[in-house]
Amino acid sequence: MTNPQTVPDLIAAAQDNAKVLEGTISGVQEDLNRSSESETQAEHNGEAVIALKLAAVDVFTLFEARMQHHFKRGPFSKKLETALLSAGHTDLATRIHGYYLAINVLKHGTGASYRELRSTSNRLFRVNSSEGIDTEIDHASLSLLDIDVPGFFEGLGTTLLEANQFLESR
């Protein structure tokens, strides 16, 4: 029987996967900038962007599931944010909240998290208008945010690792 991977191991694996996806996206973008866009290039880029967004949802969801035992029932991210604020970790609490909102939008689409993100400034991702998005298509909620900006996934991983360290040291 093998030992289960630790939360930091799983986050590191997700970050490695994200770097590959980000490299693919960057390479396709460079190709698109040098030549006219082909349907194949656009499709390849779209698949990599969707995979990156799904990886972000997966790593955050996995983090919540693995760390839930630190709190009694209830909304994990909100309880984590409160604990961080109580301990004076304001910056980390703010980052957790921002990533929570982003992941929530990627998972569920428009709603309170989407409205909150639309009303705040953010450098980690772009919030897109919901106008013109066909909510009947697969992965429609993924169109609401652009997270394929440099540093998003690295920042997500770093934030989750710091939160993991905080929870494990309590």
Image (cartoon, grey):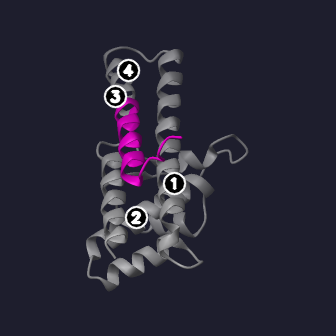
**Is the Cβ of the residue at disc 1 closer than 8 Å to that at disc 2?**
no
Disc 1 to disc 3, how far (Cα)?
24 Å
Please state which of the two labelled residues, at mark 3 or mark 4, is closer to the viewer: 3
Q: Residue 32 bears which disc, if any?
A: 4
- In the rendered view of the protein, which quadrant contains the C terminus? bottom left
Asked whether residue 56 is in view, the answer is yes
Q: Amino acid at mark 1?
A: Leu
Which residues fall within the magenta stretch? Answer: 1-21
Residue at the far front in the pictured view: 1
Q: Can you give x and y, in whole percent of width and height, for residue 110 in the image?
A: 60, 60
Q: Compute the Cα span from label 3 to label 4.
A: 14 Å
Q: Name the residue carrying label 2.
A: 98
In primary-sequence order, the first of circles 1 and 4 is: 4
Amino acid type, label 3:
Gly
Residue, disc 1: 62
Image quadrant occupied by the N terminus: top right
Marks 1 and 2: which is nearer the front?
1
Cα–Cα gap, marks 1 and 4: 34 Å
Task: Residue 43: give x, y in percent of width and height.
Answer: 54, 23
Mark 2, secondary structure of its residue: helix
* Of marks 2 and 4, the one in the foreground: 2
